[in-house]
Image (spheres, rainbow, N blue to C red):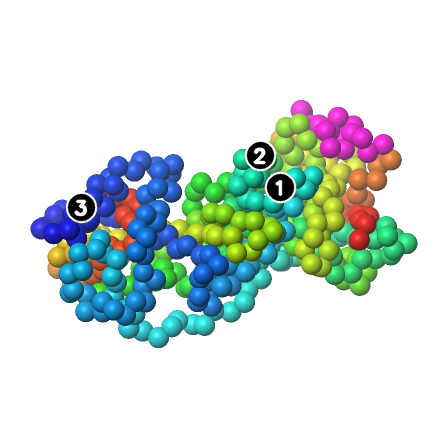
Amino acid sequence: MRREERIIRLCYRKIIDNSSTSTWEKYVFDDSYSEFMMQFQFYNQKKEYTTFSQVITNVPGSEKLHFLVSTAIVGYIKQLNGIVPDVLNNSGKHFLPFKNFRFEIINSDVTDRSRHKVAVNFFSDPLIWHDTIGSQLLVSTGDKKDKEEILTEMFSIQPLLSIYSIR
Amino acid sequence: MQRKDFLRNGIIAALGISAVAPLASSCKKDDTTAGSGSSGSSSSGSSSSGASGSCTVTPTETEGPFPTKTPSTLVRSDIRGDRTGVAFTIQIYIKNKNNSCAALANAIVDIWHCDKDGYYSEYGGTSMQTVDYTSVHFLRGRQTTDSNGLVSFTSIFPGWYQSRATHIHVHVYNSAGTSLLVTQIAFPEGSGSAVATVNSSAGTAYGYTKGMTGYTYNAQDTVFSDDSTGSEIATVTGSVSAGYALTHTIYVAA
C-alpha cells in the first residue's frame, strides 16, 4: 500500500540481565551493577533495604538512581558509534542511527547479583517512511532532494522494536 | 496477513502514545518469543512463520569493534562539563580516624554540586539523554585518593538555591566501593568571603545574578546548623578573576 511520507522515530528496547551473553552486554551488566551497589548506599544510609524496588517505593529521590547508574554505561553507549545494536536491515546489516537513549534499572538486589536487570532504550534519529512493501518498511535517513536518487533501507518491525513517534 | 495485522497494530499503538509517560509501555517487551537477532533458523526472511515478526534477518557483517572496558563517566577530575562560572578548584584530603588520622589512600570520593544558577545535573529516568554526556553529567565527579589522601577537582564556583547555604556533596567509599561517609562541605561566609563576593556585582559578569537576597546562611541551614565547631566549613582562597581554591579535610572511620 502506498502512503504519504511520514517521519518516524523508532525505539529499540535492549534488555540486559544475568543471562546476557555478548561481551558488550556483560560489560554493561557488570559495570551497571557495580555502580548500582555504590549509588544505592546513598539512598540506604540506615541500611534498611536490599532491593531497587524497596528504595524506589520508600526513599524520595531514589528514582535518580536510573541517571546516576547510567554514568557507568555511557562509555559503552559511545562505543556503539551511533548505531543501534541488534536491529538489522533486510541485508543483515546494522543501519539504525541514534543519538538519544534512556537507561533504566528494571530490577536489582545488592544481595543477589543474578537479579540485576537493566534496559537501554535506543531512540533512533528521524527516518522518512516512504512505503511499506510486504512486511518491510522502506525508510531513508537523509533529506529528500528533488530528482536526486536517495538511498533507502528496508527492515521489518521485530520484537522490542517499536515506532516511538510519528509526524 | 498476520504480519500485516501486527504492523498495523504497531502503527496504531504508536499513534496512540502521547508524550513521555506511555513511553515505557510503547517500548516494552511483551513477546516472549523475542529473538536476539542472531537466530539463524529463519535467514531467508521470506518464510511465513505466522509469528508476529519474531524471526529476524541473520547478521551478515562481522561483529563490530570489540568492546573495551570503560570506566564510569563520573571518573574525571575536570567536572565542569558544559557549565560556566568563576574558576574553582577543589582539594579534599581524606583521613582515617581509625588509624591515628593518617591519610587514607585509595578511597573513592564522589562529589557533586549545583551550577551558578543552583541547578544539579539530574535526570529522573523519565526522559532521553544524549550520547554527549557532558551536557548531562555536569558538576559530578569521582576520584581516588593518592598516598596523601588527596583528591583534586576542577570546577566552577557553586551557586545557591532556596533554603540551602552554598555547599558541595561528598560521598566517600573505601577502595571496594563500600560507603564510609556521606557528608557536605560548607563555605565561609560574611563580607569579603568567596560566597559573598561571587554573588555580588563582581560575579555578575560570570553569570552569578542571584545576589544574596534570600540566601540561607550556615547557621540557618538544615544540614550545617549543628556544626558548632565549624568542622564542615572549608578554607576558600582566591579572587573572582583568578578563581577560587577550596581545601578541606574529611575524617572517616575506615
The quadrant of the image that shows the C terminus of chain A is top left
Give the residue type at disc 3: Arg
Q: Residue furthest left?
A: A1
Tell me what residue is drawn at x 70 percent, y 47 percent.
B171
**How packed is label 1: few (under 14 Cα within 10 Å), some, or many (20 or more)?**
some
Tell me what residue is drawn at x 65 percent, y 46 percent.
A41
- Magenta segment boundaries in residue numbering: B213-228
User: Which one is in front in this view, the residue at disc 3 or the one at disc 2?
Assistant: 2
Snapshot quadrant of residue B229: top right
- State whether residue A144 appears in this view: no
From the top left corner, tell me how far across and down residue A94 is, in percent.
Answer: 31, 65
Is residue A71 inside the magenta stretch?
A: no
**How packed is label 3: few (under 14 Cα within 10 Å), some, or many (20 or more)?**
few
From the top left corner, tell me how far across and down residue B77 is, in percent.
Answer: 66, 57
Residue placed most toward the observer, B100 or B91: B100
Secondary element type, mark 3: helix
What numbered label is drawn on residue A58? 2
B91 on left or right of B3: right
User: Which one is in front in this view, the residue at disc 1 or the one at disc 3?
Assistant: 1
Provide the residue designation for mark 1: A49
From the top left corner, tell me how far across and down residue A152 is, in percent.
Answer: 20, 62
Is residue B224 inside the magenta stretch?
A: yes
Tell me what residue is drawn at x 86 percent, y 50 percent.
B97
Q: Are marks 3 and 2 on the same chain?
A: no
| B100 shown above or below A64 | below
Q: Which chain is home to disc 2? A: A
Provide the residue designation for mark 3: B8
Residue placed most toward the observer, A55 or B126: A55
Q: Are marks 1 and 3 on the same chain?
A: no
Q: Which chain is home to disc 1? A: A
